[in-house]
Image (tube, grey):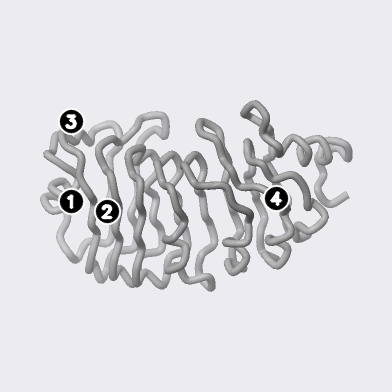
Amino acid sequence: MAKYLNIQEYLNNTYNKNTEQIIFDNPALQLSEKGELVISDYPNLEEIYVTGSEHIKINNITKVTINNCPKVKKINITTFVDNKRLEINNCPNLEILYCRNNNLTNLDFLNNLNPKKLERLSLDDNNFPKQDLTIFTKFKELKILAISGITKSSYFCGSLKPLQELKKLETLNINGTDITHGLEFLPYNVKNIDCSPVRPNAKVTDIHEELQSFGGDINK
């Protein structure tokens, strides 16, 4: 089991600037102090991801900044449970972003992503404020969108209508949210929609019941 003072020490001691992958070994990585993670100026980097079980938390990472990684296609920082802020700049080829089970409080990082490239986005189990789905409207290449609240409350609310132009969307996870209506606006390409209430008083119950009324087939 590798022990480091903080996450930046781990990064600096493990990877050089020419690396193509940065891997965080979930079960083995132990950090004794809180700290920020800065991944900057890696010209050949293509993937950043966590290995190991999603049930094992990586603690003591309070902020993640990823700058100037022009080849990076995948960022997976799932289970960075203390991470309150994510910043991504000049990563124009990013296709996959998974930041489930963090502690993020805003979606400002989406402003700097290339909507012509992003295909998969998972934001489950964070602490975003109440808001509708308008922020996702520009990401017309999305195939997977996950904004569920399973272990935490998810306050995405309102209608599914802002997703109507996401013609490539195939899978939508809105478990435990407060989204109440708009199934009729979803693109025909959507084949999988998870909308279980999960938490008490989750308003997505309305959509769940509507979907069940026609046998769970969204295209009926």
* Residue named by callout 3: 1
Residue at coordinates 34% horizontally, 32% vertically from top-left?
A: 57
* Residue named by callout 2: 22
Task: Inspect the image, locate mark 4, and give the three-letter code of the amino acid beneath it.
Answer: Gly
Front one among 31 and 23 = 31
Q: Is residue 166 left or right of residue 71?
A: right
Front one among 132 and 86 = 132
* Residue named by callout 1: 11
**Cα–Cα span, label 4 and label 2:** 38 Å
Task: Inspect the image, locate mark 1, and give the three-letter code of the amino acid beneath it.
Answer: Leu
* Residue named by callout 4: 158
**Cα–Cα span, label 3 and label 1:** 16 Å
Q: Is residue 51 left or right of residue 96?
A: left
Task: Inspect the image, locate mark 2, and give the three-letter code of the amino acid beneath it.
Answer: Ile
Mark before the other along the chain sequence, 3 or 2 = 3
Question: As displayed, is residue 119 above or below residue 28?
Answer: below
